Image (cartoon, rainbow, N blue to C red):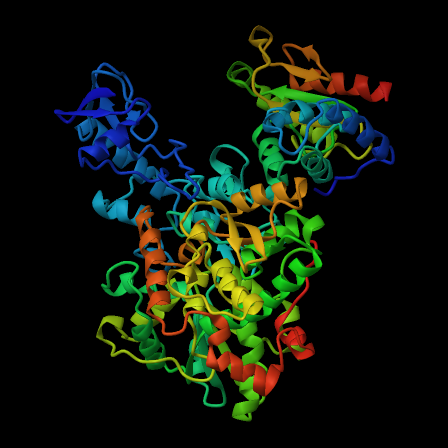
Amino acid sequence: MVNLTINGKLVSVPEGSTILEAAQKLNINIPTLCYCAKLGNGVCNRPASCRICVVEVERRRNLAPACATPVMEGMVVHTNTQRALNARRTVLELLLSDHPKDCLVCPKNQDCELQKLASEFGIREIEYKGETNKFQIDDSSEAIVRDLSKCIMCRRCENVCNNVQTVGALTGFGRGFSAKVGTAWLTPLANTSCTYCGQCVNACPVGAITGVSYVKKVWAAINNPAKTVIVQTAPAVRVAIGQEFGFESGVPVTKKLVAGLRALGFDKVFDTNFSADLTIIEEGYEIIERIKSGKNLPILTSCCPGWINFIEHHFPDLLNIPSSCKSPQQMFGAIAKTYYAEKLGIKPEDLVVVSIMPCQAKKYEASLPEYAPNGVRDVDYVVTTRELVRMFKEAGVNLSNMEDEEFDSPLGYSTGAGDIFGVTGGVLEAACRSIHWALTGEELEGDAINFRAVRGLDGVKEALVKLSPEVTINVAVCSGLGNARKVLEMVRKDPNRFQAIEIMACPGGCINGGGQPYLHGDYGLLEKRMKGLYQEDEGKPIRCSHNNPDIKKLYEEFLEKPGSELAHKLLHTTYHQK
Amino acid sequence: MGCDKLSEAAAAKFAELDAFIDGFGINRDDPRRSGRLIQVLHRAQKIFGYLPDVVQKHVAGKMFLPTSKVAGVVSFYNYFSTEPKGKYCIDVCLGTACYVKGSEKVLSEIERVLGVKADTCPTEDGLFSISALRCVGACGLAPVMVVNGKVYGKVTPAKAVEIINEYKQRG
């Protein structure tokens, strides 16, 4: 342990700690900006480039950046001397002198760490006038917008893109005043290996990286009397949105959310959990077939479009092994525009399907040409959890004042297996529950329904799972694309090690998706959101997808049987090298 | 990159570069591979004369690195050029001593005579390209210009033109 004094208070911290960490132990606040303790997967961002966290250290000539200065025995630190405060103010004013300052119309208004600092420092005037960087906004993709004129060069996005996700789309480019964090040669994002996982969107402290918004189009559809507008909401949304309306973090607010969506004017409120159950039926049968035939193993889950983009870019030699199932979002869209539109007796183009997703990649996925038969998209618009919060606030809908309401029928009923799709391990657990039944004809009783070995927020999990007395498979569950890369390299080396692998692009799964309310560094929120999803699961009377009565009805009335010709046409897809 | 053209001998150049990279025996798990990058880029620039996008992409693929990483490194170091160079590279020092002694006038005269700007494409005949650099460590000779490594001291705009004409005659 190392002993030091900060602002006159003694503190002991382990060797290798920073001044910032020591100060945190004393509850002494030192402002930070480029620093981010956890970008996911244990990666910390501390380039010490912004210098907002400078402090005075006795017998040291220069001010020290607290985030990157290791503590030393007997060190005497002062965090708020006039010299330190003046330096921080200068740093902040210099940053602001090359910043657009259009906060009122910025998508990050009130979620911006630079704005918060300017407010806390009471900046009223910026002394420094001079050249400012001007960049064209990159809105080349369907999912992510980059406005580099707002970039403060904290390098968080570059760090998360390269070291957490190992996607390698972003880099520091150029040097000096004209340096920026961008793609190679500042190529438009749509032409790079970006997977649209959106972790850079979550990491960005300012408004330099945000999501493409379809909110205006959704309002226009809702207010168009010629259109029937239905909405589906992903599992991870219900355990994340509550915190924005004063609910305890991670507590599921499903029924309030349903009421809120209805209050916005959606004609029907449905659940992506329903199509998650459908995914399990289709994918479950695929898994059983592949295990029986021993071909194209290990089977990889395919619910996550960020992850699918990743394998299409980086592992083209493995494109025969992901499940051919579309994601639950796209399954929902395909069923809505056929089965449900027929039921309503309307044309698919008069039915507007809106998705509420925790994700940026879903926006890209919904825009793919293969998901628009005859030019009519299966999913018309994707709105993230964050954007839905804004829609609620704009419309004066406060979830905390809503009465509980239920999802509509026939695409709204789901089992507990659908709920857990939103967290790492959930998809595989949901599949195992139904595969067990398909192989043995018996329902799982008591605690056997909980496949605890695949649960938890660890980046890579490996477990033996008993699917029947005869069949035991070795599975891997990983979240975060860097972990996916590790596991896929294992598959390249030893294709027989695993029989099934679940992969989600975001560390922790959809609960940490690129469209979720910002964590602002509080990774404990993920644990709470995860608990919330398992709580939803346990609260459901039916917890296995194959027992969902509306799914059974869908097969009886429409799809015939799992893997049928129609099911293949509507619910399965193919993958291509990018 | 209007002047980004690879010569027909490109295939041989790529083969030479590949042989150099293969000499390191890099595989995709090798943690040292990004440490080799600058060395490889130096060699690539020596072989190609500059580092156009295709060469950067090629290096990235061979070294199992993201293209963005290679592009980032190339963009950071002034030494690396993404534009082709002329047969004769003229460097004019704009370091403090040379600048005070009027090297900026020398540079603008060279730019005027050759009809190209510093740090852009070479002249149309491919003979000359101009770069501005900072201090070659010969401040006593300021202002200084360097042609393919040969240093000329106490240069005036008129003397610079004479030097250029010499090289022009050599062709």
Q: Is residue A55 above or below residue A385?
A: above
Q: Is residue A438 among what the camera can see?
A: yes
Q: Residue furthest left?
A: A8
Q: Residue furthest front?
A: A469
Q: Nearer the viewer, residue A49 or A338?
A: A338
Q: Is residue A388 above or below residue A58?
A: below
Residue A191 x/y as whole percent: 63, 52
Q: Which residue shows up at 18% across the image and 31% down it?
A: A80
Q: Is residue B61 above or below residue A193?
A: above
Q: Which residue shows up at 57% across the image and 81% down it?
A: A555
Residue A137 x/y as whole percent: 51, 54
Q: Residue furthest bottom?
A: A345
Q: Which residue shows up at 44% across the image and 56% down it?
A: A451
Q: Which residue shows up at 80% across the image and 32% down it?
A: B14
Q: Is residue B7 above or below residue A556?
A: above
Residue A474 x/y as whole percent: 56, 49
Q: Is residue B1 left or right of residue A437?
A: right
Q: Is residue B116 left or right of residue A155?
A: right
Q: Nearer the viewer, residue A557 or A514?
A: A557
Q: Nearer the viewer, residue A22 or A546?
A: A546
